Image (cartoon, coloured by chain):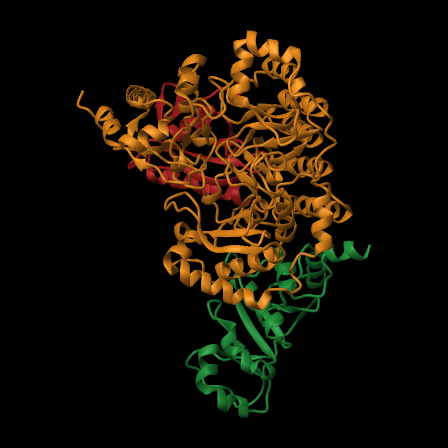
């Protein structure tokens, strides 16, 4: 899967475990949330980077206790109009202070990249033949923001106060 | 919503032109006209499918948006769309656009 | 009224440039229609029956004269010389060309107007009532809070892909002039027993296929918590609203399916986590925005002048217009003038570029350059000196904008319908026109009194037919236009949804049927009863019997 991160197209180094598949013995693995719940102890005993894939109807609070052990969380946009993962992302970053990689997968539109980034996503599964250009356009086209989010951009109301 | 006439005897392909949104009809030479009477009329399924393929190609070529088939009646050299919605698309709003004084 | 600062203007200018590039990519084939459609909708651009339609936001129904001229400019240069005001106080242009829209948006941006989020599953225009800031019964100007939400909600990264659209309305008076309870979220500013001002929060209103009136989830919310509470409501909705069925995706369905209590618990729990956090609006920002809604420099104006008195006594036309189109103002010596966009035989809510310019001129001369748009598709000059009423009346009359019919039977709310809208099943405008022609006789019109007729061309109910005293819904039966009638709807705080009268009535007979309903009202009414009062007293039966009596 093509991956856009830090303005570049990069290779995905993670192994994605599908339902019914065995977990590879070594290397970074991403498991679906149901597998995480079922095999949590065994997975935590591994000495490899761990990741979880959450369905977009899943309450992220159920993963809260383990966030410190996870280096990757994969969230889903089954159709681009389905914006549930925006909320999941913000709650993970802002309420639970998750610090690992937060990846957007599914029907990810170029024109949603800035919203996603503001909600805390830092990696995107999107075909980007000219990744640097797309990324630059996506995050710079609009640079006035009215509301705080998971990023560190200063919203206009705060800028006004310090003017 | 577009209503479908069952087993229409005659059909024409219509769409909106991409650049200006105008209602247009597919002409036999592959061009698009705002005059429904210039539309190519399909009287059998094979022809209708061929015309729709041309319509879809025009959509892919950024000429039109959303082509579809409509049922029409052919009278002499006039083509008249069937149904209120398609008549309004062909003729324009049924009300004048200047407010009454 | 609010005036953009550098941040507001920059956002708008960047948005215009962004869309210009998106249009370029579309025409060049770099974007398919499927990819482009959500992008153009987020700028208010629809593809309708005949052409592209651009919906321009009129935030909380307030326009400066410069903005109204800007709309006239777009009508003249990019459209067919007219525009249409909607029931959400926005303006629609029905004949736009895609290739010109970036230029039109650039011209609108110069007067601080745009089409951002007037479509799509996002936060839409936050409306207030059209008398905000000037109504005698108001405790505070609700538009301050409309503007706070407007900014916070613009290009919101978390809430731009909601299950469905989200409409908010705010009032600050005990009387509801804005159809508050048909909104997804409704806020009513009021004072609690301790004398503090805060919001009653209501959620889950909306018309359409399954109409609901909003229910109270919190009696009192301190003003400083408005944005955090809104964030909680929207987050619960974003996560739990239905995504599988377009007809069940509004928040009204979620509230109905969870029940008010459970829904409220979820919101309150979410709220505990965001309350008092960075999202809250600062006092400084509230003060900055509130300062822009301070009243204009009213003069010490006389309540009556000789010219006014004589005209009122001697000119029936002026007297009638005073009675229906002029309301009291909280400032002595001033009045609120409603500009009727409902001439007999006209399209409700339509206005020409010439009329827009002329009303803008009148606003400059007589109303501190301010105009309002009502959800009933009329305009308002909100600060007119009573002494100026005669000259304003004459000027409006010359423009065809002084029909004395506000709130009466010919002040019809009507969507564009099948003449323009690709969602419609039947035409609505011809019905409105034929009805208003029937009510051409002003003494009859005034005798009938308050009668709110609302017409929608499809179940999406943009004409608000559910809350009309007489509601008319266009349907398609076997390819012909029929109209279903409802009675007894009302849009005030004691709102009610209308009751279906009976089987839908054919287009050829609907106008006669409405006439018959009115005849029954006239025959049965008691002193002082409006149509709605008589209906509430006698019920559906007398109306139903006459309409569906065997021929």
Give the drawing colour for chain C: orange
Q: Nearer the viewer, residue C178 or C343?
A: C178
Give the vertical position of C306 relative to C303 (above or below).
Answer: above
Q: Is residue C481 among what the camera can see? A: no
Give the vertical position of C540 relative to C144 (above or below).
Answer: above
Quarter occupied by the C terminus of chain C: top left
Q: Nearer the viewer, residue A53 or C316?
A: C316
Give the vertical position of C19 relative to A124 (above or below).
Answer: above
Quarter occupied by the N terminus of chain C: top right
Q: Nearer the viewer, residue C304 or B93?
A: C304
Q: Nearer the viewer, residue C267 or A10?
A: C267
Residue situated furthest top in the rendering: C314
For residue A153, side relative to residue C425 (left or right): right
- Please provide percent x and percent y for residue C107: 71, 35
- Please provide percent x and percent y for residue C182: 45, 43
Q: Is residue A161 among what the camera can see? A: yes
Picture quadrant of residue A13: bottom right
- Please provide percent x and percent y for residue C451: 41, 26
Rendered residue at 60%/58% (across/down): C225
Rendered residue at 39%/49% (across/down): C247
Residue situated furthest right in the rendering: A163
- Please provide percent x and percent y for residue C546: 23, 24
The chain letter corresponding to red is B
The chain letter corresponding to green is A
Please state the total of marks drawn on the protein image. 0
């Amino acid at each position: 899967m093509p991956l856009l991160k830090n303005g570049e197209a990069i290779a995905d180094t993670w192994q994605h475990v599908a339902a019914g598949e065995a977990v590879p013995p070594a290397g970074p693995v991403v498991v679906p949330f149901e597998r995480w719940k079922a095999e949590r102890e065994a997975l935590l005993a591994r000495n490899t980077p761990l990741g979880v894939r959450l369905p977009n109807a899943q309450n992220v609070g159920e993963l809260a206790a383990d966030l410190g052990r996870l280096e990757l969380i994969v969230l889903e946009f089954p159709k681009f109009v389905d914006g549930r993962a925006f909320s999941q992302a913000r709650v993970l970053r802002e309420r639970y202070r998750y610090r690992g990689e937060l990846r957007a997968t599914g029907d990810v539109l170029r024109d949603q990249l800035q919203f996603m980034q503001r909600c805390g996503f830092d990696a995107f599964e999107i075909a980007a033949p000219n990744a640097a250009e797309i990324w630059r356009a996506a995050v710079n086209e609009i640079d006035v923001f009215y509301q705080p989010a998971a990023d560190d951009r200063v919203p206009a109301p705060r800028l006004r106060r310090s003017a | 919503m577009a209503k479908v006439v069952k087993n229409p005897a005659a059909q024409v392909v219509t769409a909106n032109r991409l650049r200006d949104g105008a209602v247009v009809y597919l002409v036999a030479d592959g061009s698009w006209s705002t005059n429904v009477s210039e539309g190519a009329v399909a009287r059998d399924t094979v022809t209708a499918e061929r015309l729709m393929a041309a319509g879809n190609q025009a959509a892919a070529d950024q000429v039109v948006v959303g082509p579809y088939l409509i049922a029409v009646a052919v009278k002499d050299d006039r083509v008249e769309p069937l149904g209120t919605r398609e008549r309004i698309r062909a003729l324009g709003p049924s009300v004048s656009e200047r407010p009454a004084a | 009224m609010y005036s953009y600062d550098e941040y507001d203007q920059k956002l708008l200018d960047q948005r215009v440039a962004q869309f210009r590039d998106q249009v370029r990519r579309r025409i060049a084939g770099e974007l398919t229609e499927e990819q482009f459609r959500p992008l153009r909708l987020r700028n208010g651009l629809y593809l309708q029956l005949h052409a592209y339609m651009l919906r321009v936001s009129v935030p909380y129904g307030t326009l400066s004269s410069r903005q109204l001229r800007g709309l006239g400019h777009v009508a003249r240069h990019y459209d067919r010389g007219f525009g249409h005001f909607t029931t959400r106080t926005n303006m629609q242009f029905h004949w736009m060309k895609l290739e010109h829209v970036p230029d039109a948006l650039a011209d609108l941006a110069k007067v601080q107007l745009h089409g951002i989020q007037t479509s799509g599953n996002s936060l839409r225009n936050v409306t207030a009532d059209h008398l905000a800031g000037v109504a005698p019964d108001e405790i505070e100007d609700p538009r301050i809070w409309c503007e706070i939400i407007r900014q916070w909600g613009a290009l919101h990264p978390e809430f731009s892909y909601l299950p469905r659209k989200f409409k908010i309305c705010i009032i600050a008076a005990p009387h509801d002039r804005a159809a508050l309870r048909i909104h997804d979220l409704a806020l009513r500013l009021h004072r609690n027993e301790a004398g503090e001002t805060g919001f009653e929060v209501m959620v889950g209103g909306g018309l359409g296929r399954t109409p609901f009136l909003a229910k109270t989830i919190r009696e009192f919310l301190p003003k400083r918590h408005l944005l955090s509470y809104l964030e909680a409501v929207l987050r619960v909705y974003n996560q739990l609203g239905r995504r599988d069925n377009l007809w069940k995706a509004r928040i009204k369905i979620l509230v109905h399916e969870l029940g008010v209590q459970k829904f409220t618990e979820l919101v309150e729990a979410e709220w505990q986590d965001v309350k008092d956090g960075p999202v809250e609006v600062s006092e400084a920002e509230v003060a900055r925005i509130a300062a822009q809604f301070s009243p204009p420099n009213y003069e010490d104006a006389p309540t009556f002048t000789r010219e006014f008195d004589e005209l009122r006594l001697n000119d029936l036309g002026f007297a009638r217009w005073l009675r229906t189109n002029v309301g009291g103002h909280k400032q002595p010596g001033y009045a609120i003038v409603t500009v009727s966009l409902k001439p007999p035989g006209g399209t409700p809510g339509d206005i020409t570029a010439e009329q827009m310019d002329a009303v803008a001129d009148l606003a400059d001369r007589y109303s501190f350059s301010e105009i309002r748009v009502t959800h009933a598709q009329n305009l308002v000059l909100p600060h007119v000196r009573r002494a100026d009423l005669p000259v304003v009346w004459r000027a409006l009359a010359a423009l065809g904008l002084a029909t004395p019919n506000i709130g009466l039977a010919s002040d019809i709310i009507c969507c564009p319908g099948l003449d323009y809208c690709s969602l419609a099943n039947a035409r609505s405008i011809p019905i409105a026109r034929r009805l208003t022609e029937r009510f051409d006789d002003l003494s009859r019109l005034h005798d009938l009194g308050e009668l709110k007729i609302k017409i929608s061309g499809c179940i999406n109910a943009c004409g608000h037919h559910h809350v009309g005293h007489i509601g008319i819904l266009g349907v398609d039966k076997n390819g012909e236009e029929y109209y279903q009638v409802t009675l007894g709807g009302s849009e005030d705080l004691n709102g009610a949804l209308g009751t279906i009268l009976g089987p839908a009535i054919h287009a050829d007979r609907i106008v006669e049927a409405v006439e018959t309903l009115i005849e029954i009202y006239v025959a049965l009414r008691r002193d002082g009863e409006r149509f709605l009062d008589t209906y509430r007293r006698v019920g559906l039966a007398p109306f139903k019997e006459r309409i569906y009596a065997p021929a």
